[in-house]
Image (cartoon, rainbow, N blue to C red):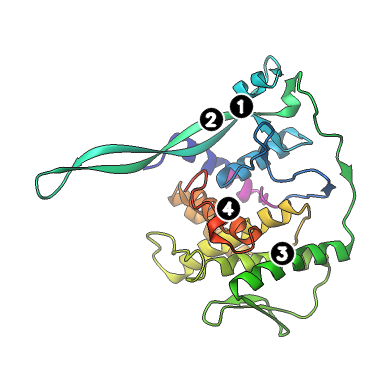
Amino acid sequence: MTTNVQRDLTRKLLERMQSGDLPWRKQWEHTGVATMPFNWSTKDGYTGINIVILWMAMDDFGYEHNAWLTFKQAQALGGRVRKGEKGVGCVYYKTLTREVDTPNGGTEEQSFPMLKRFTVFNIAQIDGLEDLPQQPEIREYEETEIVNAVDQIASVYCKATGLCIVRGGNRCFYRPSTDEVHLVRQFVDGPAYAGVLIHELIHSTGHKSRLARPRITGAESDKKAIAFEELVAELGAAFGCAEIGIQGRYDDHASYLQSWMSALENDERYFFRAAAAASLAHRFLMNGGEIEQTVRKTDVA
């Protein structure tokens, strides 16, 4: 069962993708500021589909900072949402329980998720807040900075999980049977290296010894299952690159793009599932492969 929230967002995503705009592929060249959306009051980062929702709002309205507050949080901090400002609708799942009949004539409690909506405002829409971030410094990272940052993430993760990175050959891929990430020996630049390496590391998080990521429910063929996994890796790589403040370069997945759009047209929960899985994989990678620190529940599961 889908909701109006899922339906409206899916339509918006489809419109952008059909025009050639992938909203998770943005330029992140600011340093010293968060490029992942976060709550200005709690300092917690948003996860799942909410990352993409707030990135699209950043793009639509040209906000400089990715910091957000609910109306009540703004009031609690002494701020005032300016008259006429419109918020951005985000979502989360709330677990509800109900009594259901059992085959033996008894009853038992059954839990089920209910999609709920909440509204946030960018700090640029709020007057009266104190200690706001300074104007972000805009510069391009040096090549060595990009490579070192990504290599550090990979090193910690590989040491913790036992994943092996093999360099050489003529293509990049993750092989589950040997638990190896294969990379070509040279890349055109640092952003290309970052985007590809994090993409393949996200694939590796789905290994049975880690998050044991299942195929999308109801996949009719391996081709559809592969396309879904590629979307998870695509989003996870975007999240990872944004967290360290760089813009990774990605392969042109034109064939997958058509499959993604087709899936969105037929399943309004498709992107929600992919974003949830990507967010979980991203946090698992950034937590150095420690599953205990990776919350299994995302904004939208």
Amino acid bearing label 1: Thr
> Mark on residue 279?
4
Q: Residues within 10 Å of mark 1 (few under 14, many from 20)?
A: many
| Frontmost residue, 267 versus 232 | 232
Contact (CB < 8 A) between labels 3 and 1?
A: no
Q: Residues within 10 Å of mark 3 (few under 14, many from 20)?
A: some
Q: Secondary structure at mark 2?
A: strand
Percent position (x, y) of residue 15? 59, 44
Asked if residue 4 is among those painted magenta in the image, a careful observer would answer no
- Camera-near label (3 vs 1) is 3
Q: Is residue 124 above or below residue 44?
A: above
- Camera-near label (4 vs 3) is 3
- Gap between marks 3 and 1 measured at Cα: 33 Å
Choose the circle earlier in sequence order: 1 or 2: 1
Choose the circle earlier in sequence order: 4 or 2: 2
Residues in magenta, as a range: 13-25
| Frontmost residue, 292 versus 141 | 292
Would you say residue 252 is visible in this rendering?
no
